Image (tube, grey):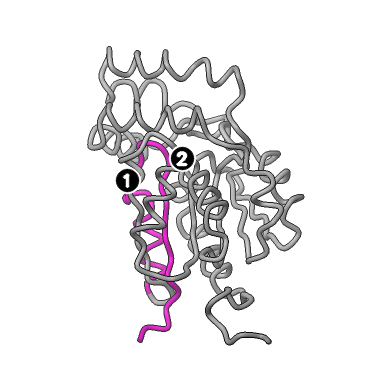
């Protein structure tokens, strides 16, 4: 039996497993990694439930970036006994604001009209970069390629899921396992302040800020993210209910 930690990796909106390639290589010796499918459902609850049904492990660690972090928190809400550790990267535990909710349908419509590739290049790429510089050419082309491979129907479902998501404040406050909160110092979409808010709910959490990185630290600072994940996986956990003898 492998002594590697079961680890579920969850990507952000319109991102594939490609955003985790550097980390999966670095984590191979300590973790049995799988990348979850976030393309099939139009609710965060449905995405989380499907993952919980299909994961082969009784319990496991979860690392999620952006939308993937939102799904990871919902997995904790639905089945806290199955999530051993939680890593949240460039994400948001709050429900969608009314202002953001109102923007979702126009974004869906625009992406349909101009095509998902051009939409990703024009609308998604700029806020993914640091405040004072755009993403690299390689990152830009990867983001566009991932968006085109997933298509508009996935963007539509994911946008609706994000629009209607729950607030996870109480979920985080109740979680007792090891937590990594990681973000880029220049993230325009999920700024440091959002992660410090989460840290206040999670006294056991490690907050790691990657200097100069924007919203895609797994691509912008792959080694730093891998090192943080390896340290997080090394943190001890309390036995999960059902994995130890009856304490009575």
Q: Pick whichever, 221 or 57, lies toward us.
A: 57
- Residue 240 in the figure: left or right of residue 111: right
**Residues packed near mark 2 inside 10 Å, few (<14), some (14 to 19) or many (20 plus):** many
Residue 220 image position (x, y, % from top left): 46, 47
Q: Looking at the image, is 114 positioned above or below residue 64? A: above
Q: Pick whichever, 202 or 57, lies toward us.
A: 57
- Residue displayed at 58% across by 31% down: 188
Q: Pick whichever, 32 or 44, lies toward us.
A: 44
- Residue 60 in the figure: left or right of residue 175: left
Q: Pick whichever, 166 or 135, lies toward us.
A: 166
**Residues packed near mark 1 inside 10 Å, few (<14), some (14 to 19) or many (20 plus):** many
Give the magenta-colored segment's residue range: 1-28
Element type at mark 1: loop
Residue 174 image position (x, y, % from top left): 69, 56
Magenta span includes 5: yes
Q: Looking at the image, is 31 positioned above or below residue 151? A: below
Residue 175 image position (x, y, % from top left): 66, 59
Quarter of the N terminus within the rendering: bottom left
Marks 1 and 2 sit apart, C-alpha to C-alpha, by: 17 Å
- Residue displayed at 51% across by 39% down: 215
Q: Looking at the image, is 47 positioned above or below residue 109? A: below
Q: Which mark is residue 66?
A: none
- Residue displayed at 43% across by 42% down: 12
Magenta span includes 180: no
Element type at mark 2: helix
Residue 57 image position (x, y, % from top left): 40, 70
Q: Looking at the image, is 99 positioned above or below residue 195? A: above
Q: Which mark is residue 44?
A: 2
Residue to which mark 1 is pinned: 16
Quarter of the C terminus within the rendering: bottom right
């Amino acid at each position: 039996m492998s002594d590697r930690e079961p680890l579920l990796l969850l990507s952000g909106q319109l991102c594939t497993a490609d955003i985790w390639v550097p980390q999966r290589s670095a984590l191979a010796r300590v973790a049995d990694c799988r990348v979850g499918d976030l393309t099939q459902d139009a609710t965060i609850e449905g995405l989380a439930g499907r993952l919980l049904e299909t994961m082969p492990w009784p319990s496991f660690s979860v690392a999620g970036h952006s939308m993937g972090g939102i799904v990871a928190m919902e997995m904790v809400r639905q089945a806290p006994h199955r999530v051993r550790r939680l890593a949240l990267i460039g994400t948001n535990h709050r429900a969608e604001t009314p202002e953001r909710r109102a923007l979702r349908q126009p974004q869906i419509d625009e992406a349909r009209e101009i095509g998902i590739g051009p939409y990703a290049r024009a609308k998604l790429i700029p806020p993914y970069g640091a405040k004072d510089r755009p993403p690299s050419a390689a990152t830009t082309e990867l983001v566009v390629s991932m968006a085109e491979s997933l298509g508009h129907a996935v963007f539509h479902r994911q946008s609706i899921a994000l629009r209607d998501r729950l607030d996870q404040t109480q979920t985080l406050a109740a979680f007792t396992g090891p937590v990594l909160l990681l973000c880029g110092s220049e993230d325009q979409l999920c700024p440091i302040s959002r992660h410090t808010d989460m840290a206040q709910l999670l006294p056991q959490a490690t907050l790691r800020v990657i200097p100069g990185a924007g919203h895609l630290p797994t691509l912008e600072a792959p080694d730093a993210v891998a090192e943080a994940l390896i340290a997080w996986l090394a943190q001890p956990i309390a036995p999960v209910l059902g994995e130890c003898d009856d304490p009575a």
